[in-house]
Amino acid sequence: MSQAAPTANVPPEQEPSTNFTVKLGIAQRAGGAVVPVMTGVLAFLAGGIVVAATGHNPWTAYKGIWQGAGFNWLFHIPWNTNTINLSAFNLSQTLLLTTTLILCGLAVAFPFRCGLFNIGGQGQYLVGLVVANWVGVSFASWPTLPHVLLGIFAAAAAGAVWAGIAGFLKATTGAHEVISTIMLNWIAIWGAQYLFGQGGPLQNTYNPAAPESGTVVQSAKIPVFWGSSALQGTDVGFFVALAMLVVFWLILNRTTLGYEVRATGFNPDAAAYGGINVRNKYIQAMAISGAFAGLAGALDMLGYLFQFGVLDVQASQIGFLGIAVALLGRNTAVGTGIAAFLFGGLLYGTTRGLNPNVFDPGLAGNLTSMIQGLIVLFVGADILILYVWNSRRKLKRRVAPA
């Protein structure tokens, strides 16, 4: 006589999740495009509410940002780059910012995959910028290609060493990388101010009264591929940044180092049990992240800045924006590239596209910072939704009649 198979009594807490929760959980784990897109939409909606509360038209403000970033040029058919076009110029400036933001975003995304949070992108960027300026001012007799390559590789190496300090402290003493990178940021900031300040080793020689660095010589300048070099066109560094997105993906997904970095990020104890030298991975991950940030400083200095002053050091915040870029891009290569383009347009669009009739220019920068902060805040929205949804279901079970 056959006996019916027993049926398991599944506790309410262990019942299968609803389709909504399952789909959202899969999207969160897969790092799909749904959550980042919704994050951006929510941030811009919240920003629009604030704009409306100030008595301005959100649609007009965002339209001004769109045009100020040069995004409208992308829909001009046929493209005509032989004539002076304000939209084309604006887009070229957006691409310059995108170049830097891609690399600063990768400087955060790579160590994050190893379980590390690199807050030191700004310091690593400044170290690379200082080294690139020194190389760019020196060796004036060199040909262009070796001069540019020397500046790029020296800056990337300097950034790697600077970030590697935090990785070394993490590996040897257990010092938290957030604390050490923040302190290294301030050392880099004050060090750059000293080097470029009055009487500093890297101050320009033609105007001792100006606390600025020397100007990069012509042989060290990265060639412009779109626009006029006199009007700060987009240089070849943009393609270098795109190439680094590919390098980032290849390292993480097609190399032993990338596998060990991801394994360490998932569970360092299990990685160590499996034979991975976790301490070395901390140092290597931070060094690679610093190389990305140092490269960003080199491309800026040799691509279009050519000179940097004490006031510029104090005002620079581009390295910190890499945190928001990496978070919105969910620490992936494609996501980081798209997020960098969005932030680049937002940064340049708010400074060029919001005239006094549209939005108070004095508040434009605050609008940018607010949207950036909202994006970072809403990055955790997927986790919050899952938590609230599961909490609601558990509450319904508890109050349900027996």
Image: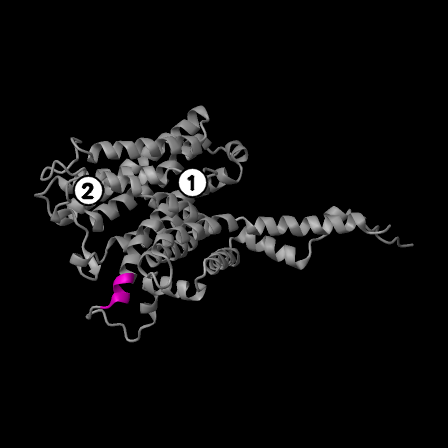
Task: Name the quadrant containing residue 307.
Answer: top left
- In this image, 196 relative to 39: left or right? left
CA–CA distance in space, label 1 to label 2: 26 Å
Picture residue at 10% right of the left edge, 44% below the top: 142
Query: In the image, which residues are magenta?
Result: 85-90
State whether residue 157 appears in this view: no
Residue 263 is marked as: none
Which residue type carries mark 1?
Pro
- In this image, 43 relative to 132: left or right? right
- Name, please, the residue furthest toward the front: 55
Residue 150 is marked as: 2
Judging depth in this view, the residue of 165 and 186 nearest the camera is 186
Which residue type carries mark 2?
Leu
Location of residue 329 in the rendering, given as x and y in whole percent from the top left corner: 44, 52
Q: What element carries label 1?
A: helix
Picture residue at 35% right of the left edge, 52% below the top: 362
Q: Mark 1 points at which residue?
A: 111
- Name, please, the residue furthest toward the left: 141
Q: Is the magenta stretch mostly helix, strand or loop?
A: helix
State whether residue 392 appears in this view: yes
Location of residue 248 in the rendering, given as x and y in whole percent from the top left corner: 38, 48
Judging depth in this view, the residue of 402 and 197 nearest the camera is 197
Above or below residue 336? Residue 297 is above
Task: Name the quadrant containing residue 215.
Answer: top left
Location of residue 24 in the rendering, given as x and y in whole percent from the top left corner: 60, 55
Specify which label sits upstream in the sequence, 1 or 2: 1
Location of residue 270 in the rendering, given as x and y in whole percent from the top left corner: 54, 35
Above or below residue 133? Residue 334 is below
Q: Dot 1 surroundings within 10 Å: few (below 14), some, or many (20 or more)?
A: many
- In this image, 240 relative to 35: left or right? left
Residue 342 in magenta?
no
Judging depth in this view, the residue of 295 and 382 nearest the camera is 382
